Amino acid sequence: MFDWSGLQLRRSLPVRLLPFIVVVLAVSLGAQDLWAQETTEENPTAATIQGTVRDDTGNPVEGARVLYGSQATETRGVTRTGNDGKYVSEVLPPGPYVVRVEGRNMAPAQSSVNVVLGTAVTADFKLEWINPGPVRLESKFDGDVSNRLPIDGRSSSGLTGDAGLIE
């Protein structure tokens, strides 16, 4: 004969484990949400460097390169300013950092900041324009070069080194 007691036990086993399975799923999904959580200002483990880069007349500097690094935390990074002159670093470990800003045709500037856990440290910069001067065109050719070059009707087959054209 068939033993129904074993079948009954197998049917009731998943029912008994159901609360345990629900708890395990809830805990694992909750932990996954914590791992996937982006760092925000409400998150005390986030630390960033942010600021605004302006020129000497107060206008925002777009596309300036912002370099930051710390020997203590062995962390380095680069970001660029937006069209409003603002920048924000990636999430950083706490410690002392050196921030350097470089803008096109502008003198670079540098500042030291101390990044603290749970805060966004502000480092604003004012860059001064440098005057690279007018563009100068210079020629490195002497006057004899044009006489030795094959131009228009001159034959280039008669060139013999430095002697020039043989006609």
Image (cartoon, rainbow, N blue to C red):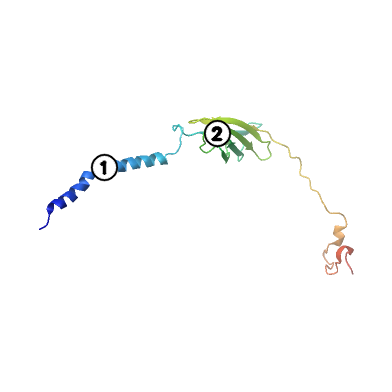
Tag 2 and tag 1, C-beta contact below 8 Å:
no
Q: Secondary structure at mark 1?
A: helix
Quarter of the image where the N terminus is located: bottom left
Query: Is residue 126 or residue 153 the one in the foreground?
Result: 126
- Can you identify the residue that label 1 sits on? 20
Q: Please name whichever residue, 13 or 108, is drawn nearer the observer in this view of the structure.
A: 13
Q: Residue at x 39, y 39 (%)?
A: 34
Q: Residue at x 38, y 42 (%)?
A: 32
Give the residue type that dot 2 points to.
Answer: Gln
Would you identify the image quadrant in which residue 88 lies? Answer: top right
Residue 33 shown left or right of residue 133 in the figure: left
Q: Earlier in the sequence, mark 2 or mark 1?
A: 1
Tell which of 15 and 107 is nearer to you.
15
Residue 47 can be seen, yes or no: yes
Tell me the amino acid under the disc marked 1: Phe
* Total count of labels: 2
- Give the crowd class for mark 2: few <14, some 14-19, many >=20 residues within 10 Å: some
Give the residue drawn at x 17%, y 49%.
9
Which percent across, then down, holds residue 132?
74, 40
> For residue 107, which quarter of the picture?
top right
Q: Which residue is identified by label 2?
A: 50
- Dot 1: within a 10 Å radius of its alpha carbon, few (fewer than 14), some, or many (20 or more) residues? few
Position of 10 with respect to 166 (left or right) is left
- Please indicate, yes or no, whether residue 60 appears anywhere in the rendered image: no
Would you place residue 88 above or below residue 167 in this image? Answer: above
Label 2, label 1: how far apart the Cα atoms are: 46 Å
Q: Nearer the viewer, mark 2 or mark 1?
A: 1
Residue located at (64% from left, 33% from top): 110
Query: Whole-percent x and y of residue 65?
Result: 61, 40
